[in-house]
Image (cartoon, rainbow, N blue to C red):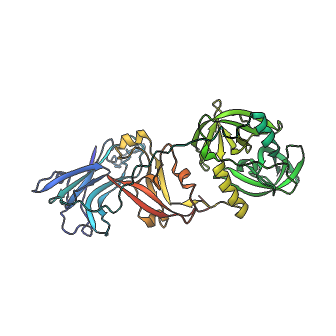
Amino acid sequence: MRFVTTSLAAALLMSTLAATSAQAQTPSGPGQSLATGPMTAWCEPGQVLLSGGYELQGAEPPASAASSGTSTPTAAPPVVFVSSSKPTVRLDRDGKIAQFGWTAVPNTLGGDAGPLTAYAICAGEPSLTPPAESIPPPPPPAPEVKTSATNAGTLNPMQVVEKVGPAVVTVINEQVSDGATTVVPVGSGSGFILDEEGHIITNQHVVAGGTEFVVVLADGREAPATLVGADANSDVAVLKIDSPVPAVAKMGDSEALLPGQPVLALGSPLGTLTNTVTEGIVSALGRSIPDEDGGPELVKLIQHDAAINPGNSGGPLVTLNGEVVGINTLGIVEAQGIFFAVPSETIQRVATELIARGKVEYPYLGLQLTQLDDQLILQWGLPVDAGYYVSGVVPGSPSAAAGMQVGDIVTAVNLERVGERQSLVGTLFQYKPGDTVQLTVQRGLVSMRIDIHLATRPENL
């Protein structure tokens, strides 16, 4: 256990006294009181702050670095997980100081340390009238009740295949192999025809690295295709053929899907078994899958159990009313019946931007975040049940301009809660650069809402 005391900056509190030792943390004078809280301790409105500190269970001071006179390297000292301990203030609607407190900020939530408790030595009588909140906490969101129109216009699987099958294609990726001068097929996937202009939807990983592309239509015709654009963040790509198209797939509403709803997967598994159909149900919605190679996290995916295999990537996931609600993108190798599709909501937005500009612009906050789970929340004694811990704020970013701080916890975006069940990245995906979003932020024991004007995500991120 460690206890730290820091003197108060005179520029912040002109009339307060500075504590110089741990013993000074015990209130000793008349009218003094001790306030505690997870990460931030707040004096009562009307009181002034005399000093503050923190207590962090499980953390020890670094071991002495003195040389032992031998060449044997010493063991690494235990990590201390607090980067700063300092006074803080809370402002009212008029920008005046309404409340003083003391904040201790961990630079990471890793390791065995925690919980972190902040202390504040306060003096004076509390105000009889509480200050007006500068940023009041949000009301609890109304529960969302989904209704489904899955029975409206329902077809049997054979009718669905007859309706959608002619719009399903095989995509062949051709590249120049080492030492060769001509392109050769190196891989294949699936796709579907989006419109009469010949735009074809597939996965970004199906076309990655391709020099030329060939599309095999459902009737066996082959047509050269050009790449309109590809987006790794959503794993969506758009190709275009100039040949007449045999059919166009109708896009459906992935937001209206419900777990248990029947779906069909169409495509070309293994690149040779064209026009293959498998049947399953929607297993879950809103899944987020991190990339094993450190690439972009795929968000808001549809989980289903309609069997897919290599070569099915980019093929449509279809409801029994014959509408495309997703494109199949991956499966879990070590499991059975766990497959994922990019939802049609994402496909339509990304495809529209790729066709118009050849790329997709994503919103940017400028925050370095750690997703909280139940273990971290319990270990550190955090005053939230879900959210994202701010471990860094990028200088010059929209979040820096809005006053976000290390140690803040983001719990909602425009009152839509974020956490393990809904990722922050997935929530932001529905917004564009230039939009203003309101983050619900827990700062110590105070909940606040902060407006942030989204910028465009830098291309190197």
Q: Look at 48% across and 57% down and name the residue there.
A: 367
Seen from the viewer's position, the closer of residues 398 and 248 is: 248
Is 363 positioned to the left or the right of 195 in the image?
left
- Name the residue furthest front: 152
Residue 69: percent from left, percent from top? 36, 46
Q: Is residue 305 above or below residue 36?
A: above
Can residue 269 be seen?
no
Q: Look at 85% across and 43% down and name the residue there.
A: 218
Q: Look at 72% across and 38% down and name the residue there.
A: 265
Is 266 positioned to the left or the right of 76 in the image?
right
Can residue 275 be seen?
yes
Seen from the viewer's position, the closer of residues 20 and 393 is: 393
Residue 436: percent from left, percent from top? 50, 63
Residue 133: percent from left, percent from top? 31, 61
Q: Quadrant of the C terminus?
A: bottom right
Is 374 positioned to the left or the right of 46 in the image?
right
- Name the residue furthest left: 30
Q: Quadrant of the N terminus?
A: top left
Seen from the viewer's position, the closer of residues 295 and 361 is: 361
Count the numbered circles shown: 0
Seen from the viewer's position, the closer of residues 176 and 188 is: 188
Residue 449: percent from left, percent from top? 40, 59
Q: Look at 64% across and 51% down and name the residue there.
A: 346
- Name the residue furthest top: 336
Residue 15 lies in quadrant: bottom left
Residue 162 lies in quadrant: top right
